Amino acid sequence: MATPTKFKALVVEKTDDGQFVRKIRARCIDDLPQGDLVVRVSYSSLNYKDALSATGHPGVTRLFPHTPGIDAVGEVLSCESGAFAVGDTVVITGYDLGMETDGGWGELIRIPSSWAVRLPDGLTQAEAMALGTAGFTAALSVLKLERAGVTRSDGDVLVTGATGGVGTIAVAILARAGYRVVASTGKSADEQFLRNLGAAEIIPRDQVLAGSERPMMKERWAGCVDVVGGDTLAAVVKSTRYGGAVTCCGLVGSTELPVNVYPFILRGVSLIGIDSVKCPADIRLQVWEKLAEEWKPAHLQEMVTEVNLDGLEEKIAAILKGEISGRVVVRMTA
């Protein structure tokens, strides 16, 4: 199968006066970075990190022109390493894709083959991007909770920031796995949406924070998937039951963690960091296989808004304002 020499991509460029502009334009394959794997992208997605890259945030991307898109799924066009055959379907999340390496908002990507995982049976390409980094992060969080000993009989599992990309999928996975899920959100209008995903109870975020000025709070949570950080994460740690566990994968609230040692030394609470970027390949494949089987969200399509490259501009602005619920999938093929 011949590899096209030209393709379409959304490109972010830095102007002479330091502004960042976004254009959909034709690119040449020679513009792409070196790598042994070339993939024709079928779908990508929109994540908060993509929006930061698209607006020139130096904490994500410093080299321009650049094509964002930290998620991609598609067909292998060539693989010099022999890790994949031409025609294989692969999914890529994490590593440097969409950061300094041109990402999934282009019809072609060229990357190291070690970044890719063969798409498991049980997931379509569109479903893989409905999950994407957000779904992978949510599933990795649930895996780590289970490995920390959190069981269905231990009590409620909390999901903070429950209407965001990671939060919605975490609610759905935990409910599918048989946990009683409590969803915390500042968006009261999305209560029915969260119940449809499997949340047994929805609480305002103020309720999570109530009493958090104390060194310890009343025990409530057997476990938690926290995507907020800051004061919210501190309050969750203080209110987790003896022997419980909390995963941490977000910082929208704050990068600071104002918590003391009491929950750790008096209740044996575990705080588990979640890194989806450099997750080892064996664990990465295990997580994707679970997402294709027993952890596949029951109402995955209800979380998804699908757009093409032309529709991204509006969605980039919305996700930066916190106005997106669920997942935005980017269709790269006609």
Image: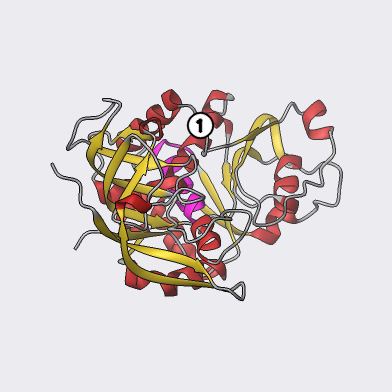
What are the residue bounds of the magenta stretch? 164-179
| Residue 137 falls within the magenta-colored stretch | no
Camera-nearest residue between 185 and 254: 254
To which residue does mark 1 refer?
Answer: 279
Membership of 175 in magenta stretch: yes
- Residue at image x 18%, y 35%? 86
Q: Name the one closer to the observer, 140 or 82.
A: 82
The answer to whether residue 226 is left or right of residue 281 is right
Q: Can see residue 298?
A: no
From the top left corner, tell me how far across and down residue 288 is, in percent.
Answer: 36, 34
Up-down relation of residue 307 to residue 162 (above or below): below
Up the image or down, 142 lies above or below 229; here it is above
Please provide percent x and percent y for residue 77: 21, 41
Towards the viewer: 307 or 244: 307
- Looking at the rendering, which quadrant does residue 328 occupy? bottom left
Viewed as shown, does residue 34 lie left or right of 179?
A: left
Residue found at the far left of this picture: 1
Q: Main secondary structure of the magenta part?
A: helix
Give the color scheme: rainbow, by chain, secondary structure or one colour: secondary structure
Quarter of the rendering occupied by the N terminus? top left
Report the amino acid beneath label 1.
Answer: Cys
The answer to which quarter of the image holds residue 35 is: top left
The quadrant holding residue 150 is: top right
Image quarter (top left, top right, bottom left or bottom right) of the C terminus: bottom left
Does 280 sit above or below residue 164? above
Q: Secondary structure at mark 1?
A: loop
Residue 119 shows in the view: yes
